[in-house]
Amino acid sequence: MNSNKKKLLIPARLKPGDKIGVVAPASPFDRKAFNQGLKVLEKMGFFPYVPDGVFEKKRYLAGTDVDRAERINSLFRDKTVRAIICARGGYGSLRLLTLLDYKAIRKNPKVFVGFSDVTALLTVFYNRCGLVGFHGPMVTTLATATQKARKALYGAIASAEKIRLTSQDAVVIQAGKASGPVLVGNLTTLSHLLGTPFAPVFEGHILMLEEINEASYRLDRMLIQMKLAGCFKGLAGLVMGSFKKCGKKKDVYEVAAEIFRGAKFPILAGFDFGHVCGNPTIPVGLKATLDANANLLLFHDASTMAY
């Protein structure tokens, strides 16, 4: 379903004392890092709520698909919960897409935060429900997140500021300036949505991609797959983020330059987001302007609304 035809649901801005529900939609997680992350949320002034079952394990998953999905559904339905943050990524979010209550999500829009494998949920919540989600630190990554990243998370979900992203290390692959709603996420996860009923609509969007632990040829293969599937047709712009442990940056940029040769939209590489300690919080579905010449991504509005 084309998200452009859905009413955009901007969640309510958080305030001190608000309850943030914690879910584990994918893999199990390190308890020490988890507890440290909860303390970070508490220091921000929030009340983390950990439902029963979050610590369950089934093979490489944090419990059964039905249980993981129902915890998400329950937190969206719970009027006392003002936001939801994921414990960790890993793998497993894709398995939940047919089990989620999208009517309840549309009826109860709220802040939802995660990245990596959680890309599947952020993308589908926007595509199916029009919900602006947040590509940002999770509970376990908050433990090692920089102060700047923690401040960015708070600013995105609890203030009226407009998000402005720049990167000193950015490399211009295609100059230019363009505007559109932002789609952001993990390259592998987005490519695995292709050919499913949950495949996102990329046309007209600024697409932001990041990855970790993938060889250059794998990045090449996924980008080519998306290109052949028509994902990049009509893009407003492209931002390549943190490709940590993906080989030499020079090779990654060369691959991107080859695949997007002749593109009419602005392209930046080397933006610092994704699997890094300084991972900024980026609203999914909110409109922004990408100015490749200025190494700047500027969102037009605040990412949350006042009560």
Image (cartoon, rainbow, N blue to C red):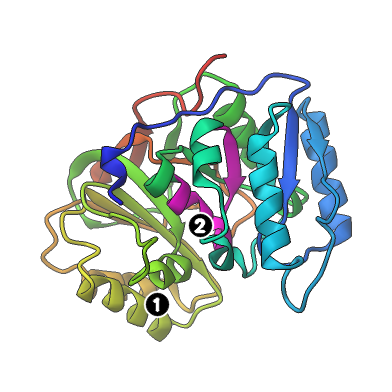
Pick the residue in front: 24 or 198: 198
Q: Circle 1 is placed at which residue position?
A: 219
Counting the numbered discs, the total is 2
Q: Circle 2 is placed at which residue position?
A: 119
**Can residue 197 be seen in this snapshot?**
yes
**Can residue 145 be seen in this snapshot?**
no
Pick the residue in front: 128 or 238: 128
What's the mark number on residue 83?
A: none
Q: Position of residue 46 (x, y in %)?
A: 77, 28
Q: Secondary structure at mark 1?
A: helix
Label 2 Cα crowd, 10 Å radius (few <14 / some 14-19 / many 20+): many
**Residue segment shown in magenta:** 109-125
Is there a contact, CB below 8 Å, between mark 2 and mark 1? no
Residue at the image position 51 percent from the left and 61 percent from the top: 98
Pick the residue in front: 146 or 3: 3
Amino acid at the residue labelled 1: Leu
Q: Position of residue 261 (x, y in %)?
A: 15, 69
Pick the residue in front: 90 or 257: 90
Residue at the image position 70 percent from the left and 33 percent from the top: 78
Q: Quadrant of the C terminus?
A: top right
Q: Position of residue 168 (x, y in %)?
A: 43, 47
Amino acid at the residue labelled 2: Thr
| For residue 99, side relative to residue 42 (left or right) | left
Label 1 Cα crowd, 10 Å radius (few <14 / some 14-19 / many 20+): many
Q: Position of residue 64 (x, y in %)?
A: 73, 68
Q: Earlier in the sequence, mark 2 or mark 1?
A: 2
Residue 201 lies in the magenta stretch: no
Q: Secondary structure at mark 2?
A: helix
Residue at the image position 62 percent from the left and 68 percent from the top: 92
Depicted 199 relative to depicted 306: above or below: below
Residue 118 lies in the magenta stretch: yes
Residue at the image position 25 percent from the left and 64 percent from the top: 231
